[in-house]
Amino acid sequence: MSEQFSSSRRHFIKGAGLIGGASLLSSSRAFSNGNTGLKTAKNLIFLVADGMGVGSLALANHWKLRHHAEPLEWVQLLENNNVQRSLQDTASASSPVTDSAAAGSAWGSGERVNNGSINYSVKGDALVPLMQYAKQAGKSTGLVSTCRITHATPASFAANVIDRDLEATIADQYLEREVDLLLGGGLEYFITKGRNLCSEFKRRGYSFVTDKAGLSNLSDSQRILGLFANSHLPYAIDRKNDPTFAQIPSLANMFKAALHPLSENDNGFILQVEAGRIDHAGHANDPAAILQELLEFDNCIPIALEFLKSNPDTLVVVTTDHGTGGCQLNGVGESYNGSGSALDRINNFRGSFESIERIYQKTGKFSRAHFNSICDLDITNDQQSVIVEKMLAGSDYMTSVIADAIASELYEETGVGWTSHAHTSEHVELAAVGVGAEHFPKLMKNYELNGIVRNTLRI
């Protein structure tokens, strides 16, 4: 169906209304009608490994097979006969290579949009995000991310901005549209000059927490705002090795904490859970960081399946929005027999490239000794000079500078190669299980997911 809701679109853009109080467009491709013959799901759990290409999935799977003698939970999921496996074409309206805003908006609105915009059509119309329909149906809504919670992927289910960088506006829309649960990073967009949105959330009845202890001590809170870092949460490898991050919850911690309050709603819920920093590690070409981010995401899959077992009226989707970096485990050594030991050497990394950048930002100096202790690589004076010179010249991301400066050593040490620091156009994996999973086609365009989900949830 295609409907245009009358009233003020400006009112909606400010985030003040639900569907009936705004001028919005519902994509004609998003939803057919209420008589589809589908079984009805009460809940949707939507797990997103942002930026995970098939190469990074294989890297993590081979590592787990080698070190734990079992495949990833994701791979075990694909071996289940009750699971529907699809490949997604991830293109946006403006490019064969999508960004996260356009990819998430395809899911969130049922329409391909231009890179950089969130739930705005190519004609400039605000499109109804998925969680607005859920709210109209009386369902609870939740967003969980290791990124800023106002980042593109979580925002794509709940917000409308013409430019994804308008994160303070996204935070405001979360409040006005009453997203019930928000867990992640991004405190900087909730406390800005002249405004404290955290206080406003609390006045609306939200519990506000800032660390793991606060999250675990919550009781009987129906609405929760949890912000655990000023920007993105530190990488999983850094949370594991740096005791100063001990009070930052893992993605699995946040996921578990989200399920109880959301499931208290008799009408059901929609919950998106994003491992957003997989994408960042791909951009940085950081092999140890991307591996640990993928393993942390993988820990969320059995949580979802356990919930499904007790709540069979649930649809679980496990997917990614695009690949990043072209990550691949490559053949190393004679007859490629060195690839396994290269996987072992990734274990010697004791932090991300970002942890090295944090020291640089704090001290204004690049420490070769610190670098060597983190990465277990002895960089040369020339490589150190290249890194420092590029940073002094104004490079935006030291993490990418590091990867480029030591690319050959990284490849030789880990066997992990990269095509770029950018997103890729590859088709990506999707697994669906539970009510409605059988209606996901073997090959699909990303925007088609919206209609399947809405039909299954009857929203």
Image (spheres, helix red, strand yellow):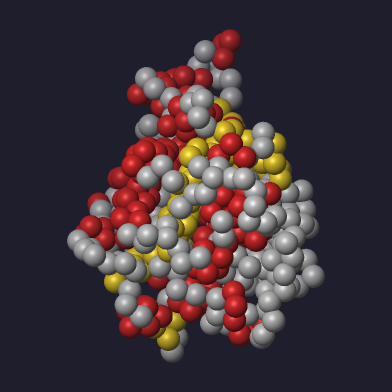
| Residue drawn where x is 39% and y is 39% of the image | 305
Q: Residue furthest top?
A: 335
Towards the viewer: 263 or 296: 263
Using residue 243 as the reference point, say whether residue 180 is left or right of it. Answer: right
Near-viewer residue (317 or 353): 317
- Position of residue 51 in the picture relative to residue 148 (left or right): right
Q: Is residue 225 visible?
A: yes
Residue at the image position 58 percent from the left and 25 percent from the top: 330
| Quarter occupied by residue 198 | bottom left
Locate the C terminus by quadrant: bottom right
Nearest to the observer: residue 165 or residue 392:
165
Looking at the image, residue 203 lies above or below residue 447: below
Relative to residue 285, is residue 142 drawn left or right? left
Residue 384 can be seen, yes or no? no
Residue 436 point in image, percent of width and height: 55, 42
Give x and y (percent) for residue 2.
Answer: 74, 65
Which quarter of the figure has residue 348? Answer: top left
Residue 225's x, y, as percent?
36, 69
Pick the quarter of the image with the N terminus.
bottom right
Residue name at image x 58 percent, y 20 percent: 331
Write down the quadrant of residue 190 in the picture: bottom left
